[in-house]
């Protein structure tokens, strides 16, 4: 398998670039966003004339960026820290039949 261009974030949902191809995609996205704003702003007469098309076109570019990350990156899901199998709720309310370290020392 090829090296993923984007690695999954450790906290939250999403990706970050991990290879030169991923960084190139991000550079193209940021460059397009800046160029697109300048192009629309130069032809506009008011803030609302600039904002509406900019938001719509940037949203479309963001969808394209998400698809590229999805296809070329690691599988993403909601995360909050390490991928340990034990959840914090298991520590507070352990499954029945488990023995804590403190209980082992008492025996």
Image (cartoon, rainbow, N blue to C red):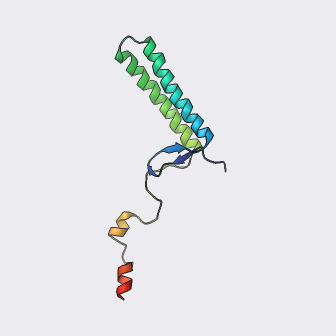
What x and y, as percent, mark residue 87? 40, 64
What x and y, as percent, mark residue 62? 48, 33
Furthest toward the bottom, the residue is 107
Q: Is residue 77 shown above or below 97? A: above
Who is closer to the viewer here, 59 or 41? 41
User: Residue shown at 67%/51% (left/top)?
Assistant: 1
In the rendered view of the protein, which quadrant contains the C terminus? Answer: bottom left
User: Residue shown at 43%/16% (left/top)?
Assistant: 41
What x and y, as percent, mark residue 75? 53, 49
What x and y, as percent, mark residue 53? 42, 20
User: Residue shown at 44%/56% (left/top)?
Assistant: 81
Taking the image as shown, residue 28 lies to the left or right of residue 89, namely right
| Quadrant of the image occupied by residue 21 | top right
Q: Is residue 34 shown above or below 23? A: above
Furthest toward the right, the residue is 1
User: Residue shown at 54%/41% (left/top)?
Assistant: 69
Q: Would residue 99 be seen by someone viewing this image from the given angle?
A: no
Taking the image as shown, residue 20 lies to the left or right of residue 54, namely right
Q: Would residue 51 be seen by someone viewing this image from the given angle?
A: yes
Count of numbered circles on the image = 0
Q: Is residue 31 shown above or below 49? A: below
| Quadrant of the image occupied by residue 90 | bottom left
């Amino acid at each position: 398998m090829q090296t993923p261009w984007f690695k999954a974030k450790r906290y939250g949902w999403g990706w970050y670039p991990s290879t030169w191809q991923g960084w190139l995609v991000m550079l193209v996205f940021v460059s397009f966003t800046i160029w697109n704003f300048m192009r629309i702003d130069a032809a506009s007469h008011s803030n609302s004339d600039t904002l509406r098309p900019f938001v719509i076109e940037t949203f479309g570019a963001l969808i394209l960026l998400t698809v590229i990350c999805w296809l070329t990156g690691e599988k993403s899901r909601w995360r909050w820290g390490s991928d340990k199998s034990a959840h914090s709720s298991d520590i507070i309310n352990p499954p029945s039949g488990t023995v804590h370290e403190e209980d082992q020392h008492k025996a």
